[in-house]
Amino acid sequence: KQSSICRAAIHYGIIDNDGGWVDITRQGRKHYFIKSNRNGVQTIGKYQSANSFTVSKVTVQAVTCETTVEQLCPFHKPASHCPRVYCPRNCMQANPHYARVIGTRVYSDLSSICRAAVHAGVVRNHGGYVDVMPVDKRKTYTASFQNGIFSESLQNPPGGKAFRVFAVV
């Protein structure tokens, strides 16, 4: 039987029975799991290799319309974890010179997180919560006009990485 993410979060004390937001980080294979009982949840111990994960509280960071992924969570190998962000309202009106959007669906880390989120359609101009997922950089970022925002194209960007944005529902 697979482990329930919510029960694991209750066991670890991240949430209670009322629920809440949980971050999951994959940890690869573990050789064994130790039985324990915490916060009313009994885990199963087993001496068998299986994939594992950890749970943690979701951190939320308020950002401006100009904040970029490069500023918020610079990328490191093997991976970076970005906090959930709360975008303010009216980012469509932000100066595109200071709040650039580079790409379509996959954005350069030089892009404004919140304007990219509006461009991608994951939040509207009234703001809201956004999850950011680092991805490998692209050789080409394609320009487009979506949801009232023009994005730029970029060829062979120096350094940097890329990201995707997701709605929090």
Image: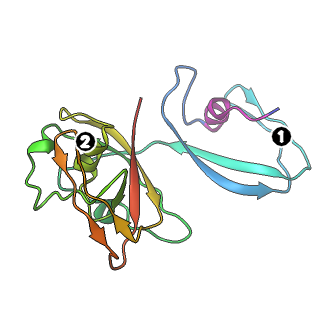
Asked if residue 145 lies left or right of residue 163, the reply is left
| SS class, disc 2 | helix
Q: Residue 119: where, in percent of width, then height?
A: 25, 44
Asked if residue 87 lies left or right of residue 163, the reply is left
Nearer the observer, disc 1 or disc 2?
2
Give the magenta range.
Answer: 2-12
The 10 Å Cα crowd at callout 2, few under 14, some 14 to 19, many 20 or more, is: many
Q: Residue 42: where, in percent of width, then height?
A: 78, 30
Q: Residue 166: where, in percent of width, then height?
A: 40, 42
Residue name at image x 35 percent, y 41 percent: 130
Quarter of the image for residue 60 reads top left
Camera-nearest residue between 139 and 40: 139
Residue name at image x 16 percent, y 41 percent: 148
The secondary structure making up most of the magenta span is helix
Q: Which residue is situated farthest in the right direction here?
A: 47
Q: Which residue is situated farthest in the top direction here?
A: 18
Camera-nearest residue between 138 and 89: 138
Camera-nearest residue between 162 and 30: 162
Residue name at image x 8 percent, y 44 percent: 93
Asked if residue 59 lies left or right of residue 52, the reply is left
Tell me whether the residue at label 1 lies in contact with that at label 2, contact meaning CB atoms closer than 8 angstroms: no
Q: Which residue is situated farthest in the bottom direction here?
A: 158
Q: Return the residue at label 2.
A: 118
Q: Is residue 35 magenta?
A: no
Q: Return the residue at label 1.
A: 35
Q: Of the residues shown, which amino acid type is indicated by label 2?
A: Val
